[in-house]
Structures are given as structure tokens and as C-alpha cells.
């Protein structure tokens, strides 16, 4: 999905991204091939072209951190397919007093659950570094 996304480019938000898609530009390659794009100046188009080349290189280099600071947090799911080995999902459940009762940590391969009174008090040791 990330190759179909433009929302990580500066000043492109959901509405503008939809406008780009409605012009038949659904992939980075479509954007790069287009001479002009309605609503984007020639200078800005050139700038975005360079950013898309950088994004392609980041994918080739398996560099998930390139996208992390650029994507809105609610849109991070867009990089999951490309970087699933770098991802971790964290779920924390609390009681009505705000005390942690359950912690779930999941990646593409395994899920670990830590429950208060069972194993939550043990050190949660993640052997591999998670980037996302």
C-alpha cells in the first residue's frame, strides 16, 4: 500500500491524496510519469518526484524509519506489508483504577500476553529490536 500512498509527502493530506488518485495516479510510478498533476505546481511536482525517488530507495534499503516520521500515525498501517518484520503491536488493558492488568505484544509471527498476578511482574524481554 505504501507505493500507492502520497500522504507522506509534505503538504499532502487525505483530501489531496484522493484528488491525485482521482486523476488516475494510483502508484508512485504513475506520479513520476505524469508531466503535470492538477493542483500541484511544476516546482512542487519536481520536489515530490525527488521525494518519491528517495522513498523508492528507502524501500529497496529496507529503511522503515524513512516513513515513520513522515506518515501520520493513523496511516502507519500503510507500511505494514513492506516492513512487517519491523512491526510490533502493543495492547495495554487497565482496570477502572488505571492499573495495568494485561499487556499483549504481537508481531507477524508470535503473540505474548502478560497478565497481572501471573507473569506481568516479570521483565518483558524483547530479544529483537522493533522499529515500528
Image (cartoon, grey):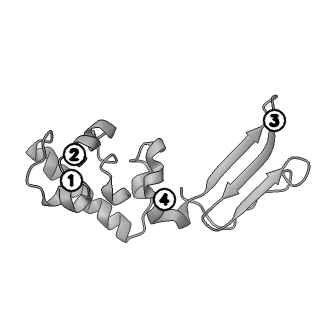
- Give the SS element for disc 2: helix
Residue 95: percent from left, percent from top: 81, 34
For disc 3, the marked residue is 99
Above or below: residue 98 compared with residue 36: above
| Residue on which the image places disc 1 | 25
In the image, which is nearer the foreground, mark 2 or mark 1? Answer: 2
Give the number of the disc on residue 80: 4
Q: Residue 52 sits in which quadrant?
A: bottom left
Residue mark closest to the camera, 4 vs 1: 1
Check if mark 2's residue and mark 1's residue have beta carbons within 8 Å: no
Residue beneath disc 2: 22
3 vs 2, front mark: 2
Per the model, the C-alpha gap separating discs 3 and 4 is: 30 Å
Q: Position of residue 86 (x, y in %)?
A: 54, 63
Whole-number angstrom distance, CA of label 3 to CA of label 1 = 48 Å
Q: Is residue 81 left or right of residue 21?
A: right
Amino acid at each position: 500500500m505504501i507505493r500507492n500512498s502520497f500522504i507522506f509527502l509534505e503538504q499532502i493530506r487525505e483530501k489531496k491524496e484522493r484528488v491525485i488518485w482521482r486523476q488516475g495516479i494510483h502508484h508512485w510510478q504513475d506520479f513520476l510519469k505524469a508531466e503535470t498533476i492538477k493542483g500541484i505546481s511544476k516546482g512542487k511536482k519536481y520536489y515530490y518526484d525527488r521525494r518519491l525517488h528517495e522513498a523508492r530507495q528507502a524501500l529497496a534499503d529496507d529503511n522503515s524509519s524513512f516513513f515513520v516520521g513522515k506518515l501520520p500515525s493513523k496511516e502507519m498501517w500503510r507500511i505494514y506489508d513492506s516492513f512487517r518484520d519491523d512491526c510490533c503491536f502493543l495492547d495495554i488493558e487497565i482496570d477502572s483504577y488505571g492499573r495495568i492488568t494485561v499487556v499483549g505484544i504481537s508481531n507477524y509471527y508470535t503473540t505474548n500476553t502478560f497478565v497481572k498476578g501471573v507473569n506481568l511482574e516479570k521483565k518483558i524481554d524483547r530479544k529483537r529490536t522493533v522499529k515500528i
